[in-house]
């Protein structure tokens, strides 16, 4: 992926949910893709001062697909993707 294409490659969580459902060949139920954070604390270099400080590093390395109730906000209905 080149630099220009990288700027254009943005997906909403709904779009990611649809892509995962299609990839996993799931055709029924309602789903959300959720980000699973990995949070680590420690002594880190301050961005505002020339010293270190206590801080948090939040990594987003995983997206998980979860099945939800039909009335859940932003849920994707997998059965609607069959014809797409």
Image (spheres, rainbow, N blue to C red):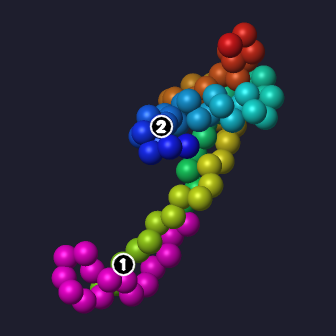
Q: Residue 73: tell me if it is visible.
A: yes
Q: Residue 72: tell me if it is visible.
A: no
- Looking at the image, which residue is at 50% across and 43% down? 2
Res. 82 mark:
none
Disc 1 crowd rating (10 Å Cα; few below 14, some 14-19, many 20+) is few
Examine the rendered structure and indicate whether residue 57 appears above or below residue 15.
below
Place residue 25 in its image quadrant: top right
The disc, 1 or 2, on the residue closer to the chain's N-terminal end is: 2
Res. 5 mark:
2
Place residue 79 in its image quadrant: top right
Considering depth in this image, is 31 or 53 the residue closer to the camera? 53
Considering depth in this image, is 8 or 77 the residue closer to the camera? 8
Instruction: Work out which residue is located at the far top of the displayed protein and give it.
Output: 83
- Looking at the image, which residue is at 65% across and 22% down? 77
Disc 1 vs disc 2: which is toward the camera? 2
Res. 55 mark:
1
Q: Position of residue 59 (x, y in %)?
A: 51, 64
Q: Which residues are magenta?
A: 38-52
Disc 2 crowd rating (10 Å Cα; few below 14, some 14-19, many 20+) is few
- Looking at the image, which residue is at 39% across and 87% down? 43
The secondary structure making up most of the magenta span is strand
Q: Position of residue 37 (x, y in %)?
A: 54, 60
Does residue 53 show up magenta in the picture?
Answer: no
Instruction: Work out which residue is located at the far left of the displayed protein and give it.
Output: 49
* Screen quadrant of the N terminus: top right
Label 2 secondary element: helix
Examine the rendered structure and indicate whether residue 74 appears above or below residue 4.
above
Mark 1–mark 2 distance (CA, rounded to whole Å): 33 Å
* Screen quadrant of the C terminus: top right
Q: Position of residue 35 (x, y in %)?
A: 56, 50
Label 1 secondary element: strand
């Amino acid at each position: 992926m080149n630099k220009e294409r990288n700027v254009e490659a943005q997906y909403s969580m709904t779009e990611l949910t649809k892509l995962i459902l299609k990839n996993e060949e799931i055709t029924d139920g309602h789903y959300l893709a959720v980000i699973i954070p990995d949070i680590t604390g420690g002594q880190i270099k301050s961005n505002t001062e020339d010293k270190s400080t206590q801080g948090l590093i939040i990594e987003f390395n995983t997206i998980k697909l979860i099945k939800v109730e039909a009335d859940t906000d932003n849920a994707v209905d997998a059965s609607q993707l069959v014809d797409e």
